[in-house]
Image: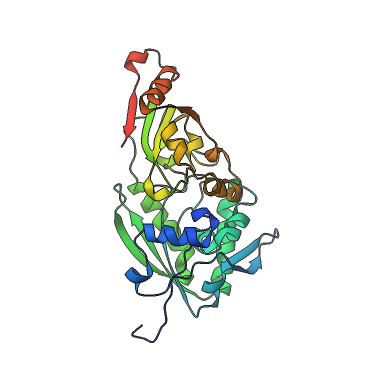
């Protein structure tokens, strides 16, 4: 503002927030970002413009309001992705293509599945960086406690390379469960505020696609509840084997299904076996975990 700029904020969230403008504004508010806290307008819209196409015909999109600005600066959390492995995963490159591309951009990037996601987000980012007024990106890398350990400003020309370097650091910083094999994994809460897949498969070892791996071998998984900030989005519940009536009663199915319909991976939005209470869900998981001695089953709980 001191330099004469008139800044405004656009949510860069792909299909999150139920793929609605108001839903994405609410997600920003959950993160503590409002017009009052930021001191500038928030323009939340799902309108996009097509800025190019890949050689295979997939269109590349950009948020209409961001595209019309004189300059774009964006913020991205750099982390290993939950469904594919590549040199660039969740971070600066993905924010350019899927985040700023809104629902249509996310849909285009996911059209051929996660098998090709790594190459597509880079190719789309190259087009966006060449044809839109992106000035720089701010990348954050977290420690094992989800606290910011590094914050880096990256000029547009260096975004793809810097994203790859930051991803390696983020992967090394991630928390992990201290067991290679778990008979029953109990997760108190899942939600979009924790991970795009409700709970991070990099931690739980349960992935929604065959294109990512790592973490422990889990016999049975139980999810007990949703976070308040997920606003009924239960994406990821389908990765578990058992859940509770309490969780099911909180599910906003249209919002939950928007993720699967956009990403083309619908297994995380399925409903697992539903039990009436926490105790019954946990007992069912132990009963079916196939441990040689159920009295000595290895049970781990994520609070």
Most extreme residue toward the bottom is 4
**Could you say which quadrant of the image residue 60 lies in?**
bottom right
**Front residue (pair 69, 133):** 69
**Front residue (pair 235, 159):** 235
- Say which residue appears at 36% left-offset and 64% top-offset: 33
Position of 137 relative to 300 (above/below): below
**Front residue (pair 223, 153):** 223
x and y, in percent, of residue 73 in the image? 44, 71
Position of 52 relative to 241 (above/below): below
Q: Is residue 253 left or right of residue 56?
A: left
- Answer whether residue 214 is visible to the viewer in this image: no
x and y, in percent, of residue 11 in the image? 47, 64
- Number of callouts in the render? 0
x and y, in percent, of residue 226 in the image? 40, 41
x and y, in percent, of residue 288 in the image? 45, 19
Quadrant housing the C terminus: top left
- Say which residue appears at 33% left-offset and 48% top-offset: 173
Quadrant housing the N terminus: bottom left
């Amino acid at each position: 503002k001191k330099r004469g700029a008139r800044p405004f904020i656009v949510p860069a969230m792909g299909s999150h927030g139920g793929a609605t403008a108001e839903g994405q504004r609410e997600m920003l508010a959950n993160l503590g970002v409002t017009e009052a806290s930021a001191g500038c307008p928030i323009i939340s819209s799902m309108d996009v413009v097509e800025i190019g196409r890949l050689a295979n015909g997939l269109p590349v999109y950009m948020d209409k309001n961001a595209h019309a600005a004189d300059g774009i600066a964006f913020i991205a959390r750099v982390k290993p992705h939950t469904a594919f492995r590549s040199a660039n995963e969740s971070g600066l490159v993905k924010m350019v293509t899927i985040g700023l591309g809104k629902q249509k951009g996310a849909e285009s990037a996911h059209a051929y599945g996660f098998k090709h996601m790594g190459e597509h987000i880079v190719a789309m980012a190259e087009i966006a960086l060449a044809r839109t007024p992106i000035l720089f990106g701010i990348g954050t890398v977290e420690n094992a406690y989800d606290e910011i350990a590094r914050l880096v400003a990256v000029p547009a020309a260096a975004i793809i390379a810097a994203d790859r370097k930051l991803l390696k650091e983020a992967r090394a910083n991630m928390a992990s469960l201290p067991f290679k094999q778990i008979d029953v994994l109990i997760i108190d809460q899942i939600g979009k505020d924790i991970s795009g897949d409700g709970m991070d498969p990099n931690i739980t070892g349960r992935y929604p696609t065959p294109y990512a791996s790592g973490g422990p071998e889990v016999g049975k998984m139980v999810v007990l509840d949703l976070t308040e900030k997920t606003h009924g989005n239960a994406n990821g519940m389908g990765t578990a084997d058992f859940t509770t009536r309490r969780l099911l009663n909180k599910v906003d199915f249209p919002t939950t299904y928007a993720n699967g319909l956009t990403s083309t991976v619908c297994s995380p939005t399925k409903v697992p076996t539903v039990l009436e209470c926490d105790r019954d869900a946990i007992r069912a998981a132990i009963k079916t975990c196939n441990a040689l001695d159920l009295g000595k089953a290895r049970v781990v709980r994520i609070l």
